[in-house]
Amino acid sequence: MTLFDLFFLISVLFALVMAVRIAVFAIRGHWQAAGRSSRFLGLFVALYATVLISVSLLRPRSFYVPSERRCFDDWCAAALSVNTAADAPCGPSEGARDWIALVEVSSVARGIRQRASDAHAELEDQQGKRYQPCATTGKSLNDVLGPGESFRVYLPFRLPRNATPAGMVLHHGDFPGVIIIGADQSLFHPPALQRLTVERQP
């Protein structure tokens, strides 16, 4: 847990306490006190949002080296490599090239089975354009993981023939990262890029 995560948890707790305080004042008919508390809470939320957006816009994009594991709670993933496909997993096409990206998914949980139902990946090229997987093969990022288990996922992508992969953007849901100051997935911040080893490019 980072200091930003801790600050987010404290902020959420403070907002909840203030909301309860406002509700109690309103129930008891103390409208002036409820109004003062509401204005204070609104000011706090506005200040938090200002800091969130400012840090997101000023903070450089995060980059991870190939095979570096990133964990979202107990669910982890590492983008390993990408190479051109020997066949055409995305179907026939002219003027395009299919690539297969390899991702290792693992769990650091000790006693539970889990799955990341909202996890998905995009392949980004050297020009910054991102592509969705064009087919499903074998294991997926959303499959169930047992405690300490891991498996590999092969994701096919179709890129223009003159495009070269630069890395992969891994998503694990928007909430609560989108409202955590300094998080890789915070509002208006460029998503983190996991570099990939390009193994073969004819």
Image (cartoon, helix red, strand yellow):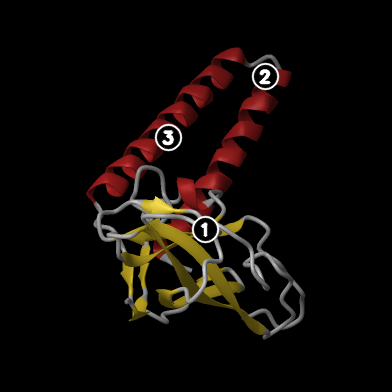
User: Helix, strand, or loop for circle 1?
Assistant: loop
Residue type, numbered disc 2? Ala
Q: Residues within 10 Å of mark 1 (few under 14, many from 20)?
A: few
The quadrant holding residue 182 is bottom left
Mark 2 vs mark 1: in front? 1
Disc marking residue 44: 3
Which of the two labelled residues, at mark 1 and mark 3, occupies the earlier sequence position? 3
Nearer-the-camera pick, 18 or 173: 173
Up-down relation of residue 100 to residue 48 (above or below): below
Image x and y of residue 44, in percent? 42, 35
Instruction: Write the residue at 52% across / 58% down.
Output: 92
User: Helix, strand, or loop for circle 3?
Assistant: helix
The quadrant holding residue 72 is bottom right
Distance between the alpha carbons at the discs numbered 1 and 3: 55 Å
Image x and y of residue 127, in percent? 25, 54
Q: Is residue 149 visible?
A: yes
Image x and y of residue 2, in percent? 43, 66
Residue type, numbered disc 1? Pro
Residue type, numbered disc 3? Phe
Nearer-the-camera pick, 114 or 37: 114
Q: Can residue 107 be seen in this view?
A: no
Which of the two labelled residues, at mark 3 and mark 2, occupies the earlier sequence position? 2
For mark 1, what is the residue? 92
Distance between the alpha carbons at the discs numbered 3 and 2: 20 Å
The quadrant holding residue 67 is bottom left
Distance between the alpha carbons at the discs numbered 2 and 1: 65 Å
User: Helix, strand, or loop for circle 2?
Assistant: helix
Horizontally, is 153 left or right of 142 in the view?
A: left
For mark 2, what is the residue? 26
Mark 1 vs mark 3: in front? 1
Disc marking residue 41: none
Q: How crowded is mark 3: few (under 14 residues within 10 Å), some or many (20 or more)?
A: some
